[in-house]
Image: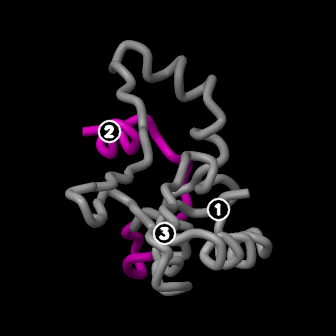
Amino acid sequence: MGRPDIPSLKPFLLARCERFKHIFYVAGNHCFYAGEYETHLQQLQALDNLNFRMYFLHNKSCFLPNNVRILGTTLWSHVPRESASRISRSLNDYYAISMMKEETSGDGKRKARRRLTVDDTNEWHA
């Protein structure tokens, strides 16, 4: 359900906004499957504008009355260097999530797609 490229996500969330006072949406790792990480993240961040009751929490928090603070972040695991090769071959995240990287060639810079790496998720974990 959580991927931003699935058409039923917005209607589902809007229906929840009609029913509940606050909706907190925190992306899981599968929200980034079948697409490019930054593109999916931008689409998910746009959910904040769906409804005043909707909060997309990506490495941020929301304060509510009575000193209640809601924290939201995708939980990426730290992968020790000695396990990186085995883990990157074993977990679907490293096959299903792609990243864009800049490459320099003779005719200038261009962006190319690459797979998510253990270095990426370790950086996000930190």
31 or 85, nearer to the observer: 31
Task: Look at 35% across and 28% down and name the residue there.
Answer: 78
Label 3 crowd bin: few (<14), some (14–19), many (20+), radius 10 Å: some
In which image quadrant can residue 8 be found? bottom right
Look at label 3 and name its amino acid: His
Which numbered marker is on residue 95?
A: none
Vertical side of 74 occupied by 35: above or below = below
The CA distance from mark 1 to mark 2 is 20 Å
First in sequence: mark 3 vs mark 2: 3
10 Å crowding of disc 2: few (<14), some (14-19), many (20+): some
Mark before the other along the chain sequence, 1 or 3: 3
Please give the name of the residue rendered at 39% of the width and 24% of the height, measured from the top-left corner.
79
State the extent of the magenta-drawn residues as a range.
103-126
> Residue 35 bears which disc, if any?
1
- In this figure, which residue is indicated by the disc labeled 2? 125
Mark 1 secondary-structure assignment: strand
Instruction: Name the mark on residue 22.
Output: 3
Rounded to the nearest angstrom, the CA distance separating label 1 from label 3 is: 28 Å
Q: Which quadrant, please, contains the N terminus? A: bottom right
